[in-house]
């Protein structure tokens, strides 16, 4: 059933791209091996190798939460810690699952526009070993960040070099990695593997897939451990072919890029609609497919009668407006006209 209201609340609200739906329908015919022993999963794994290089290993899971937590579980021990930004999804929106399932402590670090910095990491990294304290093991960065901002290649390289100099691994939460790549105008390796990232969670659901994410390790060191973590974490899907088929279509002919470019462009149009409106302040750079803005309370109330979106901060009336691959010019124009009518 189609919701008559226009959703700017989340790119998760969008449906699935027709090419993804067709890929799943094609995979539904006949029989195939279970638990990832099917041709579609094998082809998807090869596509990831073509993207990231032959040393890369991709493992498919159902959710971004699972990709983040199980990959970190495979590389940490319970007395080791993960350093994350104070607004990271792992901190704000995983219901304590990271600590519960990994046994590791997740330490929040002050961020700037959602981004970690070396200066913010120093107090946790540069201290004497002490058996009374957890030991940092992983730095996790989010690309794009929870504020929709995008790390530059140099910013990622700086963090990775600092982490590696201090014996830490770097994880990237890439639930919106396609939007980041489209924003940077780069292919994935340039700001992941080539910048020093050790492993990442590669998202597809927010950019046109029905369901499914991937964990990508850039060396084989953790492959075996992750396969056990994935099984214990209830993410070794019996009919994995339906995830593999989606990633095959997603990566094959640049569908990921087309979807992300469209979503990012729609977000810029949302921002343009808000600029100059009385009492409106855009609070973060519009790097990808998210717009953060402070709106007058009466404007929020009026707009929410026609548009789904979240109030990010109730104290300041900061809202988050998200565009997706499925956002249309007509929907954004309707939003722009509504803002103009209120103003």
Image (tube, helix red, strand yellow):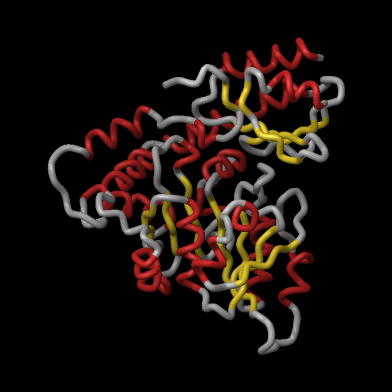
Image position of 269 with respect to 93: above or below: above
Q: Quadrant of the N terminus?
A: top left
Extreme residue toward the right, this view: 279
Nearer to us in this view, 232 or 264? 232
Q: Residue 303's quadrant in the figure? A: top right
Percent across and percent down for residue 224 are 35, 72
Image position of 126 with respect to 108: above or below: below
Percent across and percent down for residue 35 are 25, 57
Nearer to us in this view, 300 or 143? 300
Q: Quadrant of the C terminus?
A: top right
In this rendering, would 56 be left or right of 30? right
Nearer to us in this view, 95 or 167? 95
Q: Residue 331's quadrant in the figure? A: top right
Q: Which residue is drawn at 46% across and 64% down?
A: 70
Extreme residue toward the bottom, this view: 131
Extreme residue toward the left, this view: 30
Q: Which residue is drawn at 68% across and 24% down?
A: 270
Percent across and percent down for residue 246 are 34, 41
Percent across and percent down for residue 170 are 58, 66
Q: Which residue is drawn at 40% across and 62% down?
A: 56
Please give the count of numbered marks on the rendered protein.
0
Image position of 33 with respect to 20: above or below: below
In this rendering, would 65 be left or right of 185? left
Q: Which residue is drawn at 37% across and 36% down?
A: 253
Nearer to us in this view, 63 or 43? 63
In this rendering, would 27 be left or right of 9? left
């Amino acid at each position: 059933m189609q919701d008559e209201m226009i959703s700017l609340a989340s790119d998760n609200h969008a449906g699935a791209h027709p090419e993804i739906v067709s890929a799943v329908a094609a995979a539904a015919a006949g029989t195939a091996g279970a638990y990832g022993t099917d041709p579609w999963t094998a082809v998807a794994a090869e596509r990831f190798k073509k993207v990231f290089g032959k040393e890369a290993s991709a493992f498919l899971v159902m959710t971004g939460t699972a990709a983040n937590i199980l990959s970190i579980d495979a590389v940490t021990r319970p007395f080791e810690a993960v350093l994350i930004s104070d607004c990271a999804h792992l901190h704000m929106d995983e219901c304590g699952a990271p600590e519960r399932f990994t046994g590791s402590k997740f330490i929040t670090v002050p961020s700037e526009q959602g981004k970690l910095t070396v200066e913010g990491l120093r107090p946790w990294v540069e201290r004497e070993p002490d058996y009374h304290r957890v030991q940092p093991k992983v730095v996790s960065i989010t690309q794009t960040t929870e504020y929709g901002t995008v790390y530059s290649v140099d910013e990622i390289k700086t963090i990775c070099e600092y982490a590696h100099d201090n014996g830490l691994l770097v994880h990237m939460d890439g639930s919106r990695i396609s939007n980041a790549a489209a924003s940077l105008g780069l292919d994935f390796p340039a700001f992941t593997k080539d910048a020093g990232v050790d492993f990442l969670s590669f998202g597809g659901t927010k950019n046109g897939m029905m369901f499914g994410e991937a964990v990508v390790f850039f060396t084989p060191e953790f492959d075996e451990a992750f396969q056990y973590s994935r099984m214990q974490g209830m993410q070794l899907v019996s009919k994995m072919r339906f995830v593999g088929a989606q990633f095959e279509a997603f990566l094959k002919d640049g569908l990921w890029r087309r979807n992300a470019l469209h979503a990012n462009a729609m977000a810029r149009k949302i921002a343009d609609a808000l600029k100059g409106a009385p009492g409106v302040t855009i609070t973060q750079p519009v790097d990808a497919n998210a717009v953060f803005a402070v709106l007058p309370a009466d404007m929020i109330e009026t707009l929410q009668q026609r548009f789904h979106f979240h109030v990010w901060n109730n104290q300041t009336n900061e809202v988050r407006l998200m565009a997706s691959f499925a956002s249309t010019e007509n929907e954004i124009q309707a939003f722009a006209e509504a803002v103009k009518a209120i103003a």
